[in-house]
Image (tube, helix red, strand yellow):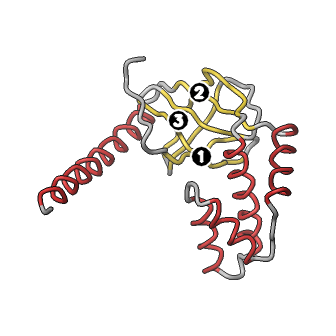
């Protein structure tokens, strides 16, 4: 139903089946009937397969729009470079795990670029800007809206709402405690 409030405060990590491979995406602006996500792939088929852990569900593309946000493309490029370095570091499990955790962290662009420099890949702002422009022209990043009618998806949403309501309650409680001690 359209009146179901969209959750914008956290994303849900999912896997999307693209060309026979499961790729990580993040469900944004989600509710019980759907969500949005970004992908570098041009998805033309309306039916998509997703999973979270072992739970699988299908969704239908409701809309698609090219994303022109250069900061988002910059973040994607830096994460891709970190991913390449993580693949090269499989012989060093600690470094590999740290890079994977850094890739999964939202934002932190400056820290991610410092990590790349430490790993021997220094990239000037001008070079990164040129790569962003090239990516935007050759492989635009798309944002998709997906409609989902699945008990599996609804259980994922209900579980996430339950967890976030506990976090919200703790935040409110800690804020109230902080105010009362001043």
User: Residue at position x 41%, y 31% from top?
Assistant: 151
The percent coordinates of residue 132 (x first, y second) are 80, 47
Against 45, residue 160 (above or below) is: below
Q: Nearer the viewer, mark 3 or mark 2?
A: 2
User: Residue at position x 72%, y 34% from top?
Assistant: 68
Pick the residue in front: 35 or 66: 66
Which quadrant holds the C terminus?
bottom left
Q: Residues within 10 Å of mark 1 (few under 14, many from 20)?
A: some
Disc 2 from disc 1: Cα separation: 15 Å
Q: Nearer the viewer, mark 2 or mark 1?
A: 2
| Disc 1 target residue | 15
| Disc 2 target residue | 145
Marked residue nearer the N-terminal end (1 or 3)? 1
| SS for callout 3 | strand
| SS for callout 2 | strand
Pick the residue in front: 43 or 50: 43
The answer to whether residue 59 is left or right of residue 2 is right
Q: Nearer the viewer, mark 1 or mark 3?
A: 1
Point out the residue furthest to the left here.
180
Disc 3 from disc 2: Cα separation: 15 Å
The percent coordinates of residue 90 (x first, y second) are 71, 76
Against 166, residue 33 (above or below) is: above
The percent coordinates of residue 14 (x first, y second) are 55, 45
Marked residue nearer the N-terminal end (2 or 1)? 1
Q: Residues within 10 Å of mark 3 (few under 14, many from 20)?
A: some
The answer to whether residue 87 is left or right of residue 172 is right
| Disc 3 target residue | 57
Pick the residue in front: 169 or 69: 69
Which quadrant holds the N terminus?
top left
């Amino acid at each position: 139903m359209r009146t179901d409030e969209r959750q914008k405060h956290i994303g849900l990590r999912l896997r999307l089946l693209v060309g026979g491979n499961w790729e990580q995406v993040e469900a944004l602006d989600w509710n019980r009937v759907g969500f949005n996500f970004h992908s570098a792939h041009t998805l033309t088929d309306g039916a998509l397969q997703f999973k979270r852990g072992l739970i699988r569900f299908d969704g239908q593309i409701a809309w698609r729009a090219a994303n022109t946000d250069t900061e988002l493309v910059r973040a994607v490029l830096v994460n891709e470079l970190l991913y390449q370095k993580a693949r090269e570091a499989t012989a060093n499990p600690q470094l590999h795990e740290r890079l994977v955790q850094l890739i999964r962290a939202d934002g932190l662009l400056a820290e991610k670029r410092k990590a790349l420099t430490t790993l021997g890949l220094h990239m000037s702002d001008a070079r990164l800007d040129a790569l962003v422009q090239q990516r935007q022209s050759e492989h635009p990043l798309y944002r998709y809206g997906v409609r989902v009618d699945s008990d599996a998806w609804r259980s994922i949403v209900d579980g996430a709402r339950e967890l976030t309501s506990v976090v919200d309650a703790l935040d409110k409680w800690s804020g109230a405690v902080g105010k009362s001690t001043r």
